[in-house]
Amino acid sequence: MSKEKELEKKPDVGQIIGDYKYGFKTENVSNVYTTKKGLSKDIVKEISMIKGEPEWMLEIRLAAYESFLRIPNPKWGPDLSFIKFDDIIYYIKSSDRVEKNWDEVPSEIKDTFQKLGIPEAEQKYLAGVTTQFDSEAVYHSTIIELEEQGVVFLDTDSALKQYPELFKQYFGKVVSHADNKYAALNTAVWSGGSFIYVPPGVKIEKPLQSYFRINSENMGQFERTLIIVDKGASVNYVEGCTAPIYSADSLHAAVVEIFVLEDAYCRYSTVQNWSNNIINLVTKRSLVEKHGHMEWIDGNIGSGLNMKYPSCILKGDYAKGTTISIAFAGKGQHQDTGAKMIHIGANTTSKIISKSIATKGGQVNYRGIVKQEGKAINAKSKIECDTILVDRESQSDTLPTNIVKNFKGQIEHEATVSKVSDAQLFYLMSRGLTEEQATEMIVMGFIEPFARELPMEYAVELNQLIKLEMTGSIG
Amino acid sequence: MSILEIRDLFVSVEDKMILKGVNLTVKGGESHAIMGPNGTGKSTLASVVMGHPKYKIESGSILLDGTDIAELAVDERSRLGLFLAMQAPIEVPGVTNFDFVKTAVQAHMPQDKKLRIGKFILDFEEAAKDLQMGTGLAHRYLNEGFSGGEKKRNEILQMKLIKPSIAFLDEIDSGLDVDALRIVGENVTKMKSNALGMVLITHYQRLLDYIIPDYVHIMIKGEIVKTGGTELIAKIDAEGYDWLKSELGITELEETKRPVSLGTCATKVPAR
């Protein structure tokens, strides 16, 4: 269906996505294989069979499917009862094999990336690339330097085949399939995602990056990412996604599991920009051992409904967790995001910086948990939640839960909600900036503490996206 | 050369009349000082000219080069050449001073012209040096964590780079120590030219020692009650505003006392 026809049929959606810079759709991509709509035991078996998986993975998938049926939707947060699980296609494969070489990538798919300016503009900066098109990785390259150091950077399906023991040791160990309904769903039908293993003592200097996108109607995305940073190692992983337009609602339920072993460091940065018809329900969790440090840099710009609370379980003594996040809710968007820090070890520290922006009637909530368990003596947590409302139609709630179960813990919590004030606008406009320019400048300044944590080209992209979303937010 | 004409201006805020028939004409090359007790409408006048949405024009007109600007938005007025150095400059976290001033200067350029960034950097650094703002100024966030004096100097820096044709300086001297006052005074004086008409709003003589005005207006209860030359400044400094009472037959003033001199500020020893 042409874009124009879609717009005719759904003027409202068209209006939302009409100015969506990255909103286009690649025509004529033939999907090599898809399961039929809906989910059943047979479909789970079928997915596992197509992938040629070991028996134990099928067993985990089936157990997860049972959990999915058993566990109800969360009783808190946005209402999810409208999701029609029977209308979703759970597996889709657009390319039969995993590409090793960019030359072999189908030209149709390359075209999509060209439109996004990805290969030209950013390849030089990439240390390794996994590009996910539909449910499975079609392109994968790992630079020799990384291979020589023993780093494994694969799409998750290939990793299961090539490193079954390592995979089995960690898969599902920090996010159990019984954790929540959507983690269960992901575990039952997962496909694609990234797998990274960094051997002891190896410090990867350049960020590893990956691009994800979805391009098929009624198609769910269930990536599974597993990152293991061994003792004394460090990695900075960057995940980005920019979704093309399509008309039907689409569910995205990813799971990210990260293991930060002793003295290791992991930073996971992402700027999520799904188009507004996507429901994004992601479980992201890390387990941090003694003296380890996990950092989540989490940007949420897109999707209609987004629930995401990156977590750190600070298990080892002196483990450290940091989450710096922004959420942007424009017209018709509901961002329910936050962070979780669970302190188990003594002398563990955590920091949460959350920046939320709501405009054009969007809703943005901060929801977070900081918990210091009985043995987490001398634990320290700092939480900073700032919200800016661009207009009177937009809304925000801050819903923190702070629990200290010992007598030597410390939690600092600061929260502010502000409006783009008349005084600020008057000041900037008195210097010749239009109301739009002034508002944009105030908002960009507000998210600066987040943007400066991103790699340069990501920060630039983020700034462009926010500016784009802000366009027309006045009057 | 621009001309700003304020004619019989009545302005209210929340149904309270603040300005009651102000008349003032400012031409390029002229410097006007507006003095008067607190709460008599001096700052209101500056804000209204700039277009602050809080104030309502009840009657009268504000003409810039013959065009009524009362209906124009704040940014349009700025682009026509108006400038207001504010009494309390606003902090904008996360926005660097450099980015802000650059955007402002760009906004004042014709659409088809592009800012030459190299030259702008040099201009910015020179202005920062003239105002003794320190080398890190460009990368500091707009007014955030600035001292009172730094904020005021930053206003003058913006004025130097934006190059307005009519500028209101609203109590640019408050919160300045002796040195800062001298720096601000010298820089403003240096800007004097036929291309710039200035209105200095102040309580005190001390600023006017550095920037000599051509005209001095005294504003009381929303009206300009007296206009003269520098001789008025000395008289006010010595006698306050009391003498105006009998002369003008005003029975009640908002502030009848002489302005209080703050010990730490650049006060002049009152004439005995």
Image (cartoon, coloured by chain):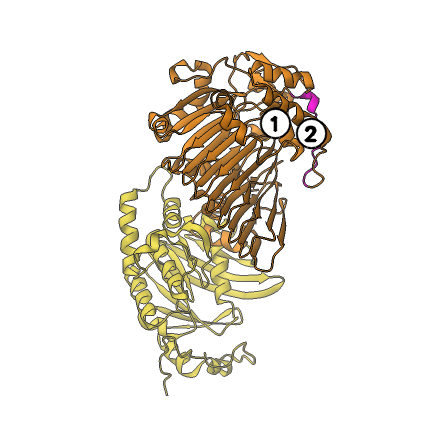
Which residue was labeled with disc 1?
A187
| Position of residue A298 measured from the top left corner of the image (x, y, whole percent) | 51, 40
Residue A172 against residue B207 in the figure, above or below: above
Q: Amino acid at mark 1?
A: Thr
Q: Which residues are magenta?
A: A77-88
Residue A261, numbered label = none
| Position of residue A234 measured from the top left corner of the image (x, y, whole percent) | 41, 39
Q: Which chain hosts label 1?
A: A
As for residue A87 lying within the magenta part, the answer is yes
Residue A50 is drawn in which quadrant? Answer: top right
On-image quarter of the N terminus of chain A: top right
Which residue was labeled with disc 2?
A67
The chain displayed yellow equals B
The secondary element bearing badge 2 is classed as: helix
Give the crowd class for mark 1: few <14, some 14-19, many >=20 residues within 10 Å.
Answer: many
Which residue is found at the position 50% from the left and 58% from the top?
B48
Residue A236 against residue B96 in the figure, above or below: above
Does residue B42 appear to the left or right of A74 in the view shown? left
Q: Amino acid at mark 2?
A: Ser
The residue nearer to you, when weighing B233 against A185, is A185
Colour that chain A carries in the picture:
orange
Q: Are marks 2 and 1 in contact (CB under 8 Å)?
A: yes
Does residue B145 appear to the left or right of A417 in the view shown? left
User: How would you classify the magenta stretch by its main secondary structure?
Assistant: loop
Q: Is residue A19 visible?
A: no
